[in-house]
Amino acid sequence: MSLNTHKFNPITALSVLLMTLVTHPVYAEVDNEKFELGKQKAKVCMTCHGEDGISTQDPYPNLRGQKVGYLISSLKDYQTRERTSGLAILMQQQADTLSDQDIRDISYFYSQLGLEAQMVKDSQLGHESQ
Ligand code: HEC
């Protein structure tokens, strides 16, 4: 009696290889270039909003993982003085130094900050469960 009925099957081996190659880059990648650019431009913001987008001071809000559209519209509202309450004057000065492109890049950076960590966690979980 022999259990050795499985022969090496090149087709199976090939399809396993193909599956590995194909499934890996499938999840949406962070646009690293844009992320890094935004990070550079956001250096000045980190004094108040924290290195990782989590502020260490109570009056300064967290920006990590915030919706990109909300970040953009908030920054524009500071520029146009639509937002004036509380400590808004601090942000008006900050926003005044930013171009539209800066606003988009920085907002992309902060919006991806939390998600990036989440994606790493998800992919690690996926590997462990194999
Ligand atoms: C001097 C400290 C300081 C710096 C530097 C600073 N901020 Fe702020 N930021 C604040 C404060 C204080 C608020 C809350 C203002 C208010 O009451 O509207 C705020 C609010 C914001 C908000 C709105 C958040 C929300 O939840 O509504 C955004 C977006 C923001 N900052 C982005 C930035 C960006 C981008 C930079 C860098 C270009 C920056 N900030 C630099 C102090 C700062």
Image: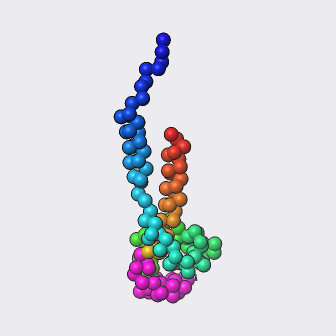
Picture coordinates of residue 113, whole percent (x, y): 51, 65
Compare residues 101 and 10 and report the one nearer the observer.
Answer: 10
Residue 40 appears at what percent x and percent y? 52, 76
Q: Is residue 89 magenta?
A: yes
Residue in front for this viewpoint, 112 or 27: 27
* Left or right position of 99 against 54: left
Instruction: Name the residue rendered at 45%, 84% in the picture.
Output: 98
When asked about the image quadrant of residue 52, the answer is bottom right
Q: Does 11 sit above or below residue 47?
A: above
Specify whether residue 48 is in view.
yes
Please tell me in which quadrant of the rendered image residue 82 appears. bottom left
State whether residue 39 is above or below residue 81: above
Chain part drawn in magenta = 78-104
What is the x, y in percent for residue 103? 43, 78
Q: Is residue 92 visible?
A: no
- Residue located at (40% from left, 79% from top): 101
